[in-house]
Amino acid sequence: MLLKTIIWIYIILCVIIAGLNYGYASKAPENVARVIMWIWLIYENWVKTFIIIICSFLTLKIVGRSRKSAMRKRNLTGFILAALTVHIIMPLIANNYELYCYAMPLPWTTAPLRLLDRESAMYQTALRVWGAGGIMSALVFFVCISAAVLVGTLLFGRRFQCSSICLFNGFAAEVFEPAIPLIGKRKKVGPKTLKVLNVFRWIFLAAALFFTFYWILHLLGFILPGNIDVITKIESYKYLSGELLMMMFFWIAFIGRGYCYFCPLGTVLSLISRIAGQQITTDNTKCVNCKKCDDACPMSINLSEKEADGISVRNIRCVGCGRCIDACPTGNLFYATRFTGRRGK
């Protein structure tokens, strides 16, 4: 009950403060806009980190009573460290409390590209608030994060980002998991819904790539059709409605990993994970075909049909969370990439 209450507070505050910051602040008097921005930054950095830490311990207390949770502990440890780094330590070092906006690599957001355009509203605002040094620190932070995610995914698969450091939806799917959905009972994603989400995946990836290449070509000096301010607003509306609100809708009504089904960055990382050789390996001498792995998987992957034959599971939806590994009563499952080799709990 406490966990659900905290999530409701988190969602309500996020909708209200984000709405004020992204919708009203630009039209408000300067002193009011400054206060709204200050509240938003406190919420996004300190409050969010506090919630992640508290709810991680609550979740471990809940799941630890009923089943093994070795992979879950690793996930939560990763998210706590990521939150402390992205929302507390680095902003204090760089004296820039908006660094979290640059903690997700392309093509998830074009914010870093817009920050390179000295004519853009984002650059002008950042220059006035942060100064040239602050802009440079944000861009360096983005490059470092992007390089870390790329290398980490090549070594450890999609698990590195989606189940260890993603502070958009990945953290909530792990930190809040026992309390999701907030309304009704947990629903298994059916075949028809999977097909719809699969269509969304490629639509959102296409949209993300469009915005990314549009800004790259714009920065290279190409004359492009359309108004750049309108393009920017469309991307902002896509984020607020198709990603932020949709993500929270899934928490309320369906599953914590709902957004992960069509996250454009997740789709790119899943393709990179294939190069990394990400898979769930099995041992058919131990499988008792209890299907607990299928029930535990938040991405609706049917593992049991391959496990009984000792066939490794490779699926574009796998986020490497390890729920199936923790759920297996016989220790039949192992998470592996070419770099890590076969590893169990």
Image (spheres, grey):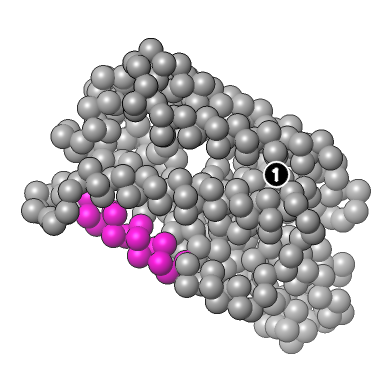
Element type at mark 1: helix
- Can see residue 76? yes
Q: Which residue, as the protein is rendered here, is positioned at the far top?
A: 31
- The residue under the point 55% across, 63% down is 261
Query: Height in image: 323 above or below 47?
Result: below
Q: Position of residue 320 (x, y in %)?
A: 62, 61
Label 1 sits on residue = 175
Asked which quadrant contains residue 125, the reply is: top left
- Is residue 189 placed above or below 74 in the rendered structure? below
Q: Main secondary structure of the magenta part?
A: helix
The percent position of residue 330, horizontal first and vertical second, equals: 86, 70
Can you say which quadrant of the picture contains the N terminus? top right
The span shown in magenta is: 201-215
Point 50% across, 26% down: residue: 40
Q: Residue at x 56, y 26 (%)?
A: 43
Magenta-span inclusion, residue 181? no
